[in-house]
Amino acid sequence: MTYSLLTSLKDSDIPQLLSNHLLPEVSRFIDINEKKYFKYVTKTENVFYYKISENGKLIGSVHCEISGTVLYVSLLIFPEFQNNGFGTKVIKDIISGALPLNFYSIEISIDKTNLPSLRLFEKVGFIKTSVDGGLVNYTYIK
């Protein structure tokens, strides 16, 4: 699996990334402002958007934001590649330091109806810290 940092608004993968973000089964959990989102992730300090590829094929992305020593993560594996262990591999790679991110803990909020994501983060060792409305909050401490 390879990770490529998105650094330019002219990146040729943006149309495919955007089309996957806008799929109904994705946008109900990860809502982005399509006009501003990629500018935000390419131009904002301490915000990192990695494209995820497997065997040269784009399969997803991971949005990372660092505040102090906390890393906030939003993971998207394209629907056609889900249930193949890619999400687990990405989270384990982040935890092990495969991406050049400096953090002490990871926090994530997941829609309580997104059962596959809830299972994924529990499986890799995240601890449920709270439930706030429709979101379940998890933390992982290195």
Image (cartoon, grey):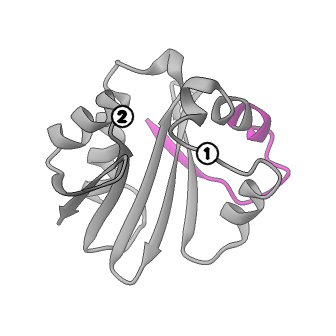
Q: Give left or right: position of 65 versus 24.
A: left
Q: Secondary structure at mark 2?
A: helix
| Residue 88 occupies quadrant | top left
Q: Which residue is mark 1?
A: 31
Judge by depth and name the residue closer to the eye, 109 or 4: 109
Q: Which residue is painted at 42% across and 21% down in the image?
A: 82
Mark 1 is surrounded, within 10 Å at the Cα level, by few (under 14), some (14 to 19) or many (20 or more) other residues, namely few
Q: From the image, state whether disc 2 or disc 1 is nearer to you.
A: 1
Q: Give left or right: position of 68 versus 24.
A: left
Q: Which mark is residue 64?
A: none
The verdict on residue 114 being magenta is no
Q: Which residue is painted at 73% across and 30% down in the image?
A: 19
Q: Give left or right: position of 95 versus 11.
A: left
The picture places residue 23, in percent across and down from the top left corner, at 65, 26
Q: Is residue 84 above or below residue 111?
A: above
Q: Is residue 88 above or below residue 67?
A: above
Q: Amino acid at mark 2?
A: Gly
The verdict on residue 5 being magenta is yes
Q: Secondary structure at mark 1?
A: loop
Judge by depth and name the residue closer to the eye, 25 or 41: 25
The picture places residue 42, in percent across and down from the top left corner, at 70, 63
The picture places residue 86, in percent across and down from the top left corner, at 37, 29
Q: Is residue 88 above or below residue 83?
A: below
Q: Amino acid at mark 1?
A: Asp
Q: Is residue 114 above or below residue 65?
A: above
Q: Which residue is painted at 66% across and 49% down in the image?
A: 32
Residue extending farthest to the bottom is 68
The magenta segment is 1-17
- Dot 2 or dot 1: first in sequence order is 1
Q: Which mark is residue 87?
A: 2
Q: Which residue is painted at 25% across and 74% down in the image?
A: 104
Image quadrant in which the C terminus is located: bottom left
